[in-house]
Image (cartoon, rainbow, N blue to C red):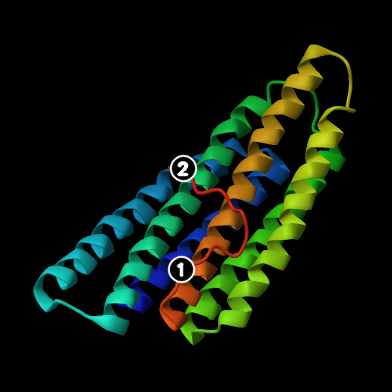
């Protein structure tokens, strides 16, 4: 069952790569592919979620097994949210094409965020597979890099031009940066579930936000 859940991280990682390609090239058609493919992530979520609920109802797991299933349900939701955030980025790509030409500095920052976030996803998956708490905790350090890049995007958005179109373009790109940051936060959430499975105690690694 863990393999069935964690396989969703590979799907999200692929979606993130395509999302970054769409951002870099302002490729609306590729963005639409990512949006359409999110149905596969959602479908997998529903299928695996039902399997886990059925397992809870029919097997009455206890102790370690119960912790694992509980953690997998949380991981599954985090994966679904990651896919949704990729969709959020792709939905604003048609908007950015209507405004000023892309500022290469802003685009470069967002691409760096995407690359770092992909590393987070890979590490979160490996940490869960290996039940490695230290590797899971290291996700916080890596996520700090994403957070700092997001702050740089914000400060840059305040600097790039005074006309309305340029500012609107910058604000739209900030929405993309924020969505990518949330993907990183969800990777940290998965790391927290690793610690829960191993120790039986749930504690947030940091004051990360958890969307509803």
Distance, label 1 to label 2, CA atoms, is 33 Å
For residue 202, which numbered disc appears in the image? Answer: 1
Query: Quarter of the image containing the C terminus?
Result: top left
Task: Residue 129: give x, y in percent of width and height.
Answer: 47, 82
Of residue 173 and residue 76, the one placed in the foreground of this image is 76
Image: 152 above or below 46: above
Picture residue at 62% right of the left edge, 79% below the top: 135
Image: 87 above or below 97: below
Q: Secondary structure at mark 2?
A: helix
Query: Quarter of the image containing the N terminus?
Result: bottom left
Left or right: 116, with 148 as reference point: left
Left or right: 58, with 152 as reference point: left
Q: Is residue 206 visible from the viewing direction of this image?
A: yes
The residue identified by callout 2 is 35
Left or right: 6, with 137 as reference point: left
Task: Residue 13: give x, y in percent of width and height.
Answer: 55, 62
Picture residue at 64% right of the left edge, 69% below the top: 139
């Amino acid at each position: 069952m863990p393999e069935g859940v964690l396989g969703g991280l590979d799907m999200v990682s692929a979606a993130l790569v395509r999302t970054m390609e769409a951002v870099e090239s302002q490729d609306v058609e590729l963005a639409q592919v990512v949006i359409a493919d999110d149905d596969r992530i959602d479908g997998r979520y529903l299928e695996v979620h039902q399997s886990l609920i059925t397992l809870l109802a029919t097997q009455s797991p206890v102790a370690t097994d119960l912790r694992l299933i509980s953690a997998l349900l949380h991981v599954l939701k985090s994966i679904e949210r990651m896919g949704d955030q990729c969709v959020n980025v792709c939905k604003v790509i048609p908007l950015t094409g209507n405004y000023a030409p892309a500022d290469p500095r802003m685009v470069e920052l967002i691409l760096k965020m995407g690359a770092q976030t992909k590393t987070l996803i890979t590490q979160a998956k490996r940490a869960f597979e290996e039940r490695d708490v230290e590797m899971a905790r290291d996700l916080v350090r890596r996520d700090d890099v994403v957070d700092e890049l997001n702050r740089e995007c914000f400060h840059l958005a305040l600097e790039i031009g005074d006309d309305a179109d340029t500012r609107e373009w910058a604000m739209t790109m900030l929405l993309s940066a924020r969505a990518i940051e949330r993907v990183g936060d969800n990777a940290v959430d998965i790391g927290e579930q690793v610690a829960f499975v191993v120790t039986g105690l749930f504690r947030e690694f940091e004051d990360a936000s958890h969307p509803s």
